Image (cartoon, coloured by chain):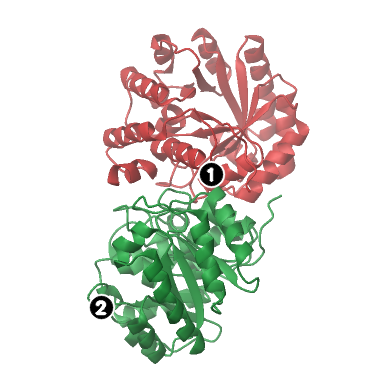
Chain colours: A green, B red
Amino acid sequence: MLDLVDKVLIEDESLRNGLQIEKRLFSVEGKLHFIRGMESCGLRRIQVGSFVHPKWVPQMANTDELLARLEPTPGVTYTALVLNERGLERAIAAGVKHLSMSISASETHSLKNTNKTLAQARAEIVPLIERAVASGIAVRAGIQSALGCGYGGEVPLARVYEIAETYSGLGVSEINIADTAGLGNPRSVAETVAAVRKVIDPTIAISLHLHDTRGLGLANMVAGLQAGVGIFDAALAGLGGCPFVPGAAGNIATEDAVHALSALGVETGIDWRALCDLALEMETILGRRLPGRMAHVVRAT
Amino acid sequence: MLDLVDKVLIEDESLRNGLQIEKRLFSVEGKLHFIRGMESCGLRRIQVGSFVHPKWVPQMANTDELLARLEPTPGVTYTALVLNERGLERAIAAGVKHLSMSISASETHSLKNTNKTLAQARAEIVPLIERAVASGIAVRAGIQSALGCGYGGEVPLARVYEIAETYSGLGVSEINIADTAGLGNPRSVAETVAAVRKVIDPTIAISLHLHDTRGLGLANMVAGLQAGVGIFDAALAGLGGCPFVPGAAGNIATEDAVHALSALGVETGIDWRALCDLALEMETILGRRLPGRMAHVVRAT
């Protein structure tokens, strides 16, 4: 009955979006342990960190060292987040082959988060993407707050697809629609994906970054599947919180998303039961229960 | 893009499915307080309890007294659960106008839960429904474990629609497809609703009882909306747990479901923000955080 894509790639963001708001700092060894664990569960794209200022995001300060020590596993893509030229230089020096870059679709969010207007952010990301693409890096260009702004700023659909249109001309491999504040719903997901697809090069993949703040994470994933999206971001145990809602649920939980996809008959190549062990390990390290469901269902049954 | 029903009735089951597994016993006054609170938020159908043996479910022992003391609000339906003849007699004596009755679609679940085979359970519910209908009571007939059995029992789709077909001939007003163990997914929801609809009288409404055990509660609700379902069960703050998974999430949270419906542009007549206060009150009384999301999002923002 449901018309869904039949194969999905999951990008796990535990080590970047997940850990960047945690108080606990993870060592390079600690991060490598989770990378190896996720690979052995079948994950094929892992966002390992971000090249941002260590003063602002100390959790990501060891990203350069992590990449230097990371022996690549064939078939696995290691990606990272870059937000400015200094970061791009570090990423190039680290030999990264795949990068995420993004700006917000909300003027308010852009100003509060980066002190830049939308016009400034847009003007700055264009040469950054161009330089990365020219360096042979696959670029995934993201649109933050694409389904609503956590600060209450306006996000007209036209602004989202105009940013996508800009990205499309720059040689990016993927456009990421990010529901940073978890404000999306299945209808807005479907509408936004369709609007973006209409204006971009048909060879560019669309991915969704979904937060489960309001409990709609997996419902929005299903809407994405129905809209033909084949790449979804997730984080172990639902790490990641919400920058606008203290204590809220984070990204959709990788193990819950993979379980749901498996139940729906969508292929991921990932063993969600094995991921549950990693999710529980993450909870043990952080010392609290996280929002993910399947790890606890598996443990209790 | 999404083709959804445009109006939904929510049946709140906080006081029955929600409280029946809680250690804390609620007084008649305590239950009345929540009934009045839910009514003032706009809820129009409330399951206030069940007529089951007080020895097995002491939380429901005051259902008769509750109904005797409940001054009905015009436009609100008060319903209760009945599972046997003694319960039906009590319900008739209490003057109830609307009742839920149900059997399981899983042989294993039926045997473990009621010590009856499916054949026995089916043979016993038929005269029960007939008697209730003959007494002028609107009967909603339920199919427990319709989307999977928490004990691992088999639930072929054919068995679900055969039970629905049996109900259809008995004058019931509604058939409730219950995902007792939270094992459904959007695809199985769509398939089951379509299969049931095909065999029942077209004037009989279909409702969904969804548990969020595996995080798919709202995704399944959306699949139900797409399949044309217009009645959903829910419980404040996601009360209800899962009989098969200790500590698991319960029913879809009423305030989260209404928020999601509102975001999707589906009319419910219910104020989800006001419901959040009631959800927080329930958490305070029970002394723990419950799975519902929106009450905490509202409180934090």
The residue beneath circle 1 is: B181
Q: Is residue B182 visible?
A: no
Q: Secondary structure at mark 1?
A: loop
Give the amino acid at mark 2. Pro
Residue at the image point whose x is 64% and y is 56% from the top = A226
Asked whether, in this view, residue A270 is left or right of residue A84, the answer is: right
Residue at the image point whose x is 57% and y is 67% from the top = A206
Q: Position of residue A213 (x, y in %)?
A: 40, 52
CA–CA distance between discs 2 and 1?
Answer: 46 Å
Q: Position of residue B182 (x, y in %)?
A: 53, 45
Asked whether, in this view, residue B196 is left or right of residue A245, the answer is: right
Residue B229 found in image quarter? top right
In the rendered structure, the residue with mark 2 lies on which chain?
A: A
Residue A120 found in image quarter? bottom left
Q: Position of residue B119 (x, y in %)?
A: 70, 32
Residue nearer the viewer, B225 or B138: B225
Q: Secondary structure at mark 2?
A: loop
- Above or below, comparing residue A156 to residue B299 in the picture: below
Residue at the image point whose x is 44% and y is 11% from the top = B72
In the rendered structure, the residue with mark 1 lies on which chain?
A: B
Asked whether, in this view, residue A240 is left or right of residue A76, the answer is: left
Are the residues at dot 2 and dot 1 in contact (C-beta closer than 8 Å)? no
Residue nearer the viewer, A42 or A235: A235
Give the amino acid at mark 1. Ala
Residue at the image point whose x is 61% and y is 65% from the top = A199
Asked whether, in this view, residue B3 is left or right of residue B38, the answer is: right
Q: Which mark is residue A54?
A: 2
Q: Is residue B261 visible?
A: yes
Q: Position of residue B91 (x, y in %)?
A: 52, 14
- Above or below, comparing residue B65 to residue B207 in the picture: above
Both on one chain, marks 2 and 1? no
Residue nearer the viewer, B234 or B130: B234
